[in-house]
Image (tube, rainbow, N blue to C red):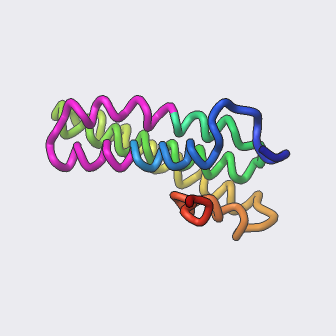
Amino acid sequence: MNNEQRPFFISKDLLDSTNSVSWFLMDASWMLEVQELSIFMIIPTILSGLFLCYIEKRRTHTLINVAILCWICMNISWMFSEVLELNSYLSLAKIFFILGSLFVILALITSENISETFSHFKRFRIKNWK
């Protein structure tokens, strides 16, 4: 751990990978119309996204993580709009899209190093796996 992260019981790399895998499984099961699995996968996807927002100390990285969490919430709302056939969830998905876009713009405006700010989008840090 370094000065850029808060202490947490799971490493940031493991959280990031967990978030990616659970999000992928949530979206894939939604696409494959396995509703029970897609709804179940909401829990680890949201929790790992929230933990990523908490663990990061750097402001611009936190803003990007919040934008990613908005993207996750947009997917979940969109999924609910289709599964429950309620247009109000699609409207909520659009709100999350706008919020996520605003957080990305805010990260761009406040960033001192744009390339470093967006560097953590690289998922599955395979270079460290052996």
In percent of the image, x 51 and y 49: which residue is there?
A: 17
Quarter of the figure with residue 79: top left
The front one of 87 and 115 is 115
Task: Give the x, y percent position of residue 51.
Answer: 60, 34
Is residue 62 magenta-colored?
no
Is residue 26 magenta-colored?
yes
The front one of 67 and 56 is 56
The front one of 46 and 99 is 46
In percent of the image, x 33 and y 38: which residue is there?
A: 77
In percent of the image, x 20 and y 49: which residue is there?
A: 31
- Say which quadrant the N terminus sits in: top right
**For the view shown, which residue lies furthest in the front direction?**
130
Task: Give the x, y percent position of residue 4.
Answer: 80, 47
- Say which quadrant the C terminus sits in: bottom right
Q: Is residue 77 above or below residue 97?
A: above
In percent of the image, x 14 and y 42: which residue is there?
A: 33
Task: Give the x, y percent position of residue 25.
Answer: 31, 45
The region drawn magenta spans: 23-47
